[in-house]
Image (cartoon, helix red, strand yellow):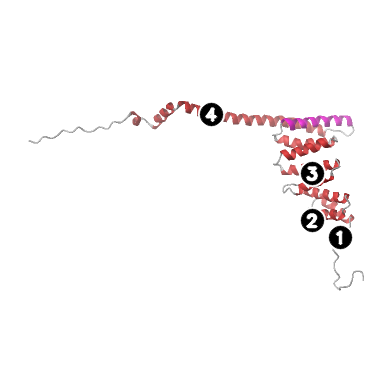
Amino acid sequence: MAYRIKTVPKTTLVDDAHLLSGMERLWLKAEEHRRAVLGGAILAVTAVVAVFAVFYYDHLQAEKAMDLHRQAARLYVDRAVGQPAKADENLTKAIGLYRQVVDQYPRTPTGQLATYELGNALVQANDLGGAIEAYRKHLATYQTNQTLRGLVHQRLAFAYLLNGDREQAVKQFTAVLEMPAALNKDQAIFELGKLEEAQSRPEGALARYQDLTKAYPSSPFAAEAEVRIKALGGKKAEAPIPDPTGKPEGK
């Protein structure tokens, strides 16, 4: 008689982890790494708060700079011709406020403009050394606004001229011509022509004036350049047209 061996069916044991849902497993992982998760969350929140604080601080700085700048501009403009003492007082106060903006809020957009306007105010106060320093500081500090930089180079050139330094003035006017985004190139060419005239170099002056009239015919300086060309005998400087008969000129 044959005996059949009784077999016991195999059962698969499933551990508790496989019975958990995805969210539950995630939660368990978070519990296991609670300190690391909490530390990362704190760092993230701290970073967001720090960025917000920086933006808010910059906003407050910009507002303070703008308020001081408005006061300075109002005093600078309010200089009545008939009240010289009051005009000088307002100019002095304006310079003080411009300096405050430049010294305390240099990173603001207003600080950039105030550095330029401080130089202008110092020229009005006949402090040419201070004006030159302010203009040079602007050029060394601010690089983005090329249009304004062109004006600063021009103002610096005038300050050098008033201070008796013609060579530096020429360098600053020339720097304007080398700036692609400068909007005052026509005036820079005109001023270089005037400097050539002042040094008794009519050929150089004519070349500058002629360049101006060709490159910027609609410029208000072009009309004055035409006058200067005629005064310097510009037409005589042009090559004579040869006589088609081949006869010498004047016969």
Work out which residue is located at the far left of the displayed protein and give it: 1
The crowding category of the residue bearing disc 4, from other C-alpha atoms within 10 Å (few below 14, some 14 to 19, many at least 20), is: few
Q: CA distance from mark 1 to mark 3?
A: 30 Å
Say which label, 1 or 4, has the lower sequence index. Answer: 4
What residue range appears in magenta? 84-104
Q: Which mark is residue 214?
A: 2
Work out which residue is located at the far bottom of the displayed protein and give it: 245
Amino acid residing under circle 4: Leu
Q: Which mark is residue 43?
A: 4
Q: Main secondary structure of the magenta part?
A: helix
Q: CA distance from mark 1 to mark 4?
A: 76 Å
Residue pointed to by mark 1 = 237
Figure quadrant of residue 206: bottom right
Q: Are marks 2 and 4 in contact (CB under 8 Å)?
A: no
Q: Which is more toward the observer, 223 or 237?
A: 237
Q: CA distance from mark 1 to mark 2?
A: 16 Å
Figure quadrant of residue 75: top right
Say which label, 1 or 3, has the lower sequence index. Answer: 3
Vertical order, 36 against 194 (above or below):
above
30 left or right, relative to 219 = left
Q: CA distance from mark 3 to mark 2?
A: 21 Å
Q: Which mark is residue 154?
A: 3
Q: Which quadrant does the C terminus fall into?
A: bottom right
